[in-house]
Amino acid sequence: MIRAWLTPTLLVLAGLLAAGSRAADGGWGVGLVLLAVLLLLAFVASPAFFPRSIGAAEALRRSGTDGRPVVYWRPGCTFCMRLRARLGVRARQAYWVDIWRDPEGAAAVRAVNGGNETVPTVLLDGRHHTNPDPAWLRDRIDGPAHPDAGPPGR
């Protein structure tokens, strides 16, 4: 759990040091901007930015019931942060498994990625997708178009 918060903690400390240094030189505005930017980066790098993680077994059970994707991730992963940010509110429609907290999830990721813990790895419709394009996953979460549904807006 400590390593999940290491990067965000270091970013907060760097922000405080940068802001304090600028403020001591009379540059309050620049100091506050630096602090705000580093606090935002700390939040995005933290586990708090992600939906609540559940165990791999529970995620697979739930996904089997409702067909939602399972996203295997780990704190500090820039590709995971990118996926989470680009999914926006749709991220809550997936089941998130933190592989640093769930050994079963880590083993599942290693099994499909040649022994590597490459994340994000998404399980959808029985297939694993390593570091998928966020737009692709957004489209899948929104639901496939049915052939008889007609064009949007009808």
Image (cartoon, helix red, strand yellow):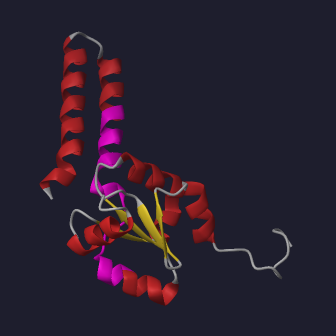
Number of numbered discs: 0
Left or right: 152 with respect to 111? right
In the rendered view, would you say 63 is above or below 42? below
Pinpoint residue 121: horizontal percent, then vertical percent. 41, 63
The residue sitting at 47% across, 90% down in the picture is: 65
The residue sitting at 33% across, 70% down in the picture is: 111
Quadrant assignment, res 1: bottom left
Q: Is residue 51 magenta?
A: yes
Most foreground residue, 112 or 7: 112
Q: Residue furthest top?
A: 25
Most foreground residue, 104 or 82: 104
Left or right: 38 with respect to 129? left
Pinpoint residue 101: horizontal percent, then vertical percent. 21, 67
Left or right: 13 with respect to 149? left
Q: Is residue 52 visible?
A: no
Quadrant assignment, res 47: bottom left
* Image: magenta residue range: 37-59
Pinpoint residue 9: horizontal percent, then vertical percent. 19, 42
Pinpoint residue 54: horizontal percent, then vertical percent. 30, 75
Most foreground residue, 72 or 88: 72
Q: Main secondary structure of the magenta part?
A: helix
Q: Is residue 91 magenta?
A: no
Q: Is residue 50 visible?
A: yes
Q: Residue furthest left?
A: 2
